[in-house]
Amino acid sequence: MSTVEHPPETRASRPRSEQAGPWSDGLGRAGARAGQTLLIAAVAVGLIVIMLRVSVVVLAVLVALILASAVSPLVRWLVGKGWSHLWATLMSFLVILLVAGGVITGVVLAIRNEWQGLVESALEGWQQLQDLVTNGPIPIDASVIDDATQQASDFLASGDYASGLASGTLTGISAATNFLTGLILMIVVLFFLLKDGPKINSFMLRWFRGETRAKLAESVDRSSEVLGGYVRGTATVAAVDAILIGIGLFIVGVPLALPLAVVTFIGGFIPIVGATAAGILAALVALVTTGPVEALIVIAIVIGVNQIEGNLLQPVVMGRTLSLHALIVLLALTIGTIVGGIFGAILAVPYTAVAWTLIQVWSHRYQSGDDPVLGKDPLSPQDRASRKASRSQREKYRKISQTEQDGEDLSASEETAEPEDPAQRQAVETGLPDSSGSTGDPGTSGSDPAQR
């Protein structure tokens, strides 16, 4: 039996309809990719416009998520001590209200009577600094400084910067009403996240299966760790900075030490920029109230505290929670400030860290390790998201990835055969304990996917 060898199919032998078309060459493929890129960009712009329309809701949910991530360990600890989930949630919620109320009350009481003097001292110090620059060895035209100051003031007062919360909301509602609405909504969302967070997570994961469900579960865990660690670490570091700088200002003799320490604490929630701005303000006040020598001492104190923060407090308290380069932090702060004002500046960095964590969870294209040509790996092994999962979490993700049922009862495929013993059959049908002494319950053997 002979075999007939068919010649390889050539381009000329193909039908004319199957030959290369206008989209098959390099320019056509580039055009297709450009069209896809424009379509994705249009969808992204549409989503951004929608979120800006409901910016109050978006900000309330983002703040509630970050606070819930910070306080959820307390809820789990109380539940582990025997508390019911509802009472653990109420206690944690009460702790949040007391801490937040105490901080706000302390800030108001600290700066209420001295705020005017703080502003006047800062303005006078800025004027003295401007005179020193214009009359120094390298004179600078005062009009240049005035123009720069005016542009900065116009930017801060412009609608593009100050309308972070109120842009696109219902016409005629004041900013105060929007803030109050967002605050109430944030409190409600926070309560339900603390109370029903595991149920919400389980409900969302059950729409997916297999490896996708495992990756989503890992994304939730890593994001919660990043947000919670950032809030707890930042609050601790900001409090230590405020105490140290406040003590230094008190020793130097700066009269507005308490409100300056409060400003330092608030500025600590804005990485890099907040600490720098608080240090500049403290130096300007010291320059006016005490003199240039004391101002230099204050600058030295601020620099020393910042060094302690960067080299000791941040690594010990926050660990490697963010794992972001300083350039990414600055870019995130800039974009967040332009889009959402002060709230955008506060929330930009932690959610940028969450985005970087999700990229690591869902993408496997990054080649880790040292390369003979590229050199040392710029990403430390401790910064990788895969290294931050505990052994129990990895086992949970492995079990979740084995779930492949689609739209079916997870326990239906694992039901055992009907018991042959009449006493056991009656116990299963009635739901009463088995009188024969058997402790097994065939109706619940496969009800928990985590036990599969």
Image: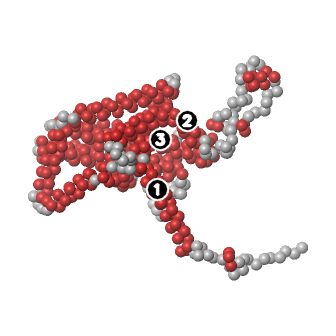
Task: Determine whether 193 is above or below 31 in the image.
Answer: above
Mark 1 Cα-neighbour bin, 10 Å: few <14, some 14–19, many ≥20: few
| Residue sitting farthest toward the left | 135
Residue 344 in view in this figure: no
Looking at the image, tell me whether mark 2 or mark 1 is earlier in sequence order: 1
- Counting from the top left corner in percent of width and height, residue 305 is at 27, 42
- Counting from the top left corner in percent of width and height, residue 254 is at 16, 38
Looking at the image, tell me whether mark 1 or mark 3 is earlier in sequence order: 1
Is residue 75 found left or right of 317 in the rendered image? right
Residue 51 in view in this figure: yes
Disc 2 versus disc 3: nearer the observer: 2
Q: CA distance from mark 2 to mark 3?
A: 15 Å
Query: Which residue does the image show at 45% across and 51% down from the upper left?
Result: 50
Mark 2 Cα-neighbour bin, 10 Å: few <14, some 14–19, many ≥20: few
Callout 1, which amino acid? Answer: Gly
Q: Nearer the viewer, residue 211 or 144?
A: 144
Q: Which residue is mark 1?
A: 46
Q: Which residue is mark 3?
A: 224
Query: Which residue does the image show at 38% across and 43% down from the upper left?
Result: 315
Is residue 173 found left or right of 213 in the rendered image? left
Specify the label residue 115 is tagged with. Answer: none
Q: Secondary structure at mark 3?
A: helix
Q: How many marks?
A: 3
**Quarter of the image where the C terminus is located:** top right
| Residue sitting farthest toward the front | 172
Q: Which residue is mark 2?
A: 199
Task: Determine whether 138 is above or below 102 in the image.
Answer: below
Mark 3 Cα-neighbour bin, 10 Å: few <14, some 14–19, many ≥20: many
Looking at the image, tell me whether mark 2 or mark 3 is earlier in sequence order: 2
